[in-house]
């Protein structure tokens, strides 16, 4: 495929605009949106490890996105473990993983023979830096996650709504919890190039938060999240192009503006319409 | 696959459960036979919920065996044969934006299986079940907007929709007003008589329950009584709750 850097970037952004908010709805109702933030920092550890290994042993075919994904997956499994270990302090798992991840990244970065700009791209995203290999990675992970979401959607929703009920209905909890970790790791690593590690959590959490204000049913929640996610991505890309702003930041700022508008809109609707039960 | 000749739906043998050094359950044997409406009673903290969680494989016992439909728990696969309504609809996140229809449809998932979606037949069944518990008109309402009693009926519909042979309810009436509780027991009693649904009801509220159930089991760390509702005496309760308890409107069916 002969695509310009801009086309590659836009395709990648559209994929992420759909999948990150979709994951976000499930994480939000599971009350574990914070997991995405911790894991994104572990992904940075994986990335820096990948850059370090690739730079030191040039004969090894190491791509930082893949090592990022591997670390992210390992991190999510480790979080589950920590949550069991600190059963009464479950919220500790996220900061433990987050700080250890950042510390390790800093060490790897200082060892790696790489410039500031590359790190900056990973931290804040840069759609113009989406190469062909990156796009392939994003497309493959996008397809895998879409298929997983479709196949297991019923189970993912049930487990998010009611763990105990789901277990008694015969759903294999370990499988579904692993699937959650796997999907989170997948979505974070595919989003890295576009919105960056520091902003991926926002793209997961913001559209879902806005959708929660609007939706009465789960189906509506998912649809609104995706619509808001894509709206943020499209307006962010266009805005950043015309105003020469950082794309990842523009996307997240758009998402935040949409959330703000929704939060303002609701009380306005309530004032102007006499309470309507549906 | 489904064997209709099975008579013992649940059999728990010599169950022991400890939390730290504290013994929660000590050598409990409990069985539920087809067609029974068994009330499992006991004071708060007597281990009732623990026993149910062990029964359903949610907790691992320190000793003893469980079999469901005459199969060891570990091998049991037909979860659609068991409906479960947990202690608190509060174990679920009621801020979750789901409609009554969506909640009930979750109960259908174990029947539908992977890769498949709900078809017209499933959707009709969901409507019928909502009708049965009197919640059909609320089908498109958000679950969080309903009252506690209404939510409880939705969760019963969710448990019933897969057409289970036994329904297990753990303290279903906590936080529900007295009139609703009455309706609720009538609904259960009707399901038991008309649809031959086996019921296991866990409650700490002895009074009203004994009017409706066919069998009673009293639990306080171990089983103090297990038999038909007619044979159940107040003395069985005082031995368990202690002498000072007040038993409200404790009547067996017929006498009043």
Image (spheres, rainbow, N blue to C red):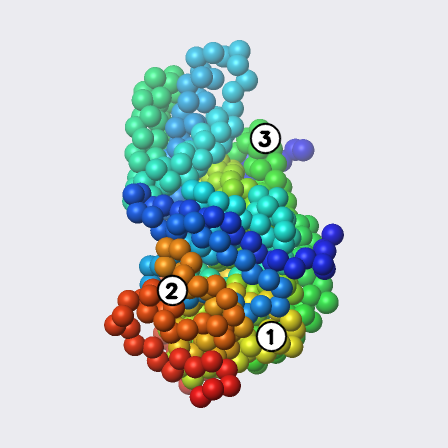
Give the chain of mark 2. Answer: B
- Foreground of the two, A114 or A201: A201
Q: Residue at x 45, y 22 (%)?
A: A50
Gap in angstroms between the C-alphas marked 3 and 2? 66 Å
Instruction: From the image, state whether disc 1 or disc 3 is nearer to you.
Output: 1
Residue B166 in the image: above or below residue A138: below
Q: Quadrant of residue B51?
A: bottom left
Name the residue that disc number 3 marks.
A132
Q: Position of residue A185 (x, y in %)?
A: 48, 38
- Pick the front one: A87 or A36: A87
Q: Is residue B140 left or right of residue A277?
A: right
- Is B57 located above or below residue B202 in the figure? above
Do pointers 3 and 2 mark residues of a single chain? no
Q: Position of residue A198 (x, y in %)?
A: 37, 40
The disc, 1 or 2, on the residue closer to the chain's N-terminal end is 2
- Check disc 2 and report the residue beneath it: B42
Task: Identify which residue, A83 or A110, lies in the foreground.
Answer: A83
Percent from the top left, x then y, of residue B30? 50, 56
Identify the secondary structure beneath mark 3: helix
Q: Residue at x 37, y 55 (%)?
A: B221
The residue under label 1 is B191
**Of circles 1 and 2, which is in front?**
2
Neighbor class of circle 3 (other Cα within 10 Å; few <14, some 14-19, many 20+) is: some
Mark 1 surroundings within 10 Å by alpha-carbon count, few (fewer than 14), some (14 through 19), many (20 or more): some
What is the quadrant of residue B189 in the picture? Answer: bottom right
């Amino acid at each position: 495929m002969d695509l310009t850097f801009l086309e590659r970037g836009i395709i990648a952004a559209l994929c992420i605009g759909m999948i990150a908010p979709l994951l976000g709805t499930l994480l939000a109702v599971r009350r574990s949106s914070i997991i995405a933030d911790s894991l994104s920092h572990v992904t940075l550890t994986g990335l820096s490890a990948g850059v370090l290994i690739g730079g030191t042993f040039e004969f090894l075919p190491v791509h930082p996105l893949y090592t990022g994904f591997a670390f992210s997956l390992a991190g999510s499994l480790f979080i589950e473990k920590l949550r069991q270990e600190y059963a009464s302090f479950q919220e500790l798992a996220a900061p433990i993983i987050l700080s250890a991840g950042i510390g390790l990244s800093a060490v790897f970065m200082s060892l790696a023979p790489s410039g500031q700009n590359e790190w900056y791209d990973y931290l804040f995203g840069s759609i113009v830096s989406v190469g062909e290999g990156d796009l392939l990675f994003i497309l493959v992970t996008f397809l895998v996650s879409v298929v997983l979401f479709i196949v297991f959607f019923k189970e993912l929703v049930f487990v998010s709504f009611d763990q105990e009920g789901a277990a008694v209905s015969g759903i294999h909890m370990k499988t579904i919890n692993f699937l959650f970790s796997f999907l989170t790791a997948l979505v974070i690593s595919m989003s890295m190039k576009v919105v960056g590690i520091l902003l991926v959590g926002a793209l997961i959490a913001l559209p879902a938060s806005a959708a929660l204000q609007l939706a009465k049913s789960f189906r509506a929640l998912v649809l609104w999240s995706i619509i808001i996610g894509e709206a943020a991505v499209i307006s962010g890309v266009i805005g950043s192009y015309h105003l020469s702003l950082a794309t990842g930041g523009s996307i997240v700022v758009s998402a935040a503006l949409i959330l703000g508008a929704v939060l303002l809109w609701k009380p306005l609707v309530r004032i102007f319409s006499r309470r309507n039960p549906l | 696959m489904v064997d209709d000749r099975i008579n013992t739906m649940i059999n728990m043998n010599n169950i022991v459960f400890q939390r730290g050094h504290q013994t929660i359950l000590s050598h409990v044997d409990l069985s539920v036979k087809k067609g029974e409406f068994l009330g499992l009673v006991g004071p708060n903290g007597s281990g009732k919920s623990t026993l149910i969680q062990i029964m359903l494989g949610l907790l691992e016992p320190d000793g003893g065996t469980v079999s469901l439909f005459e199969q060891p728990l570990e091998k049991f696969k037909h979860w659609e044969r068991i409906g479960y309504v947990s202690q608190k609809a509060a174990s679920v996140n009621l801020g979750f934006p789901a409609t009554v229809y969506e909640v009930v449809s979750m109960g259908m998932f174990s029947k539908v299986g992977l890769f498949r979606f709900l078809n017209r037949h499933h959707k009709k069944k969901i409507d019928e079940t909502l009708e049965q518990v009197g919640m059909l008109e609320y089908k498109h309402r958000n679950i969080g907007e309903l009252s506690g009693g209404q939510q409880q009926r939705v969760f019963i519909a969710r448990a019933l929709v897969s057409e289970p042979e036994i329904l297990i309810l753990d303290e279903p009436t906590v936080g529900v007003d007295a009139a609703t509780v009455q309706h609720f027991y009538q609904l259960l009693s009707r399901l038991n008589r008309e649809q031959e649904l086996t019921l296991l009801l866990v409650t700490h509220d002895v009074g009203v329950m004994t009017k409706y159930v066919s069998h009673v089991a009293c639990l306080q760390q171990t089983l103090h009584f297990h038999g038909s509702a007619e044979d159940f005496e107040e003395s069985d309760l005082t031995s368990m709750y202690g002498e000072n308890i007040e038993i409200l409107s404790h009547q067996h069916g017929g006498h009043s």
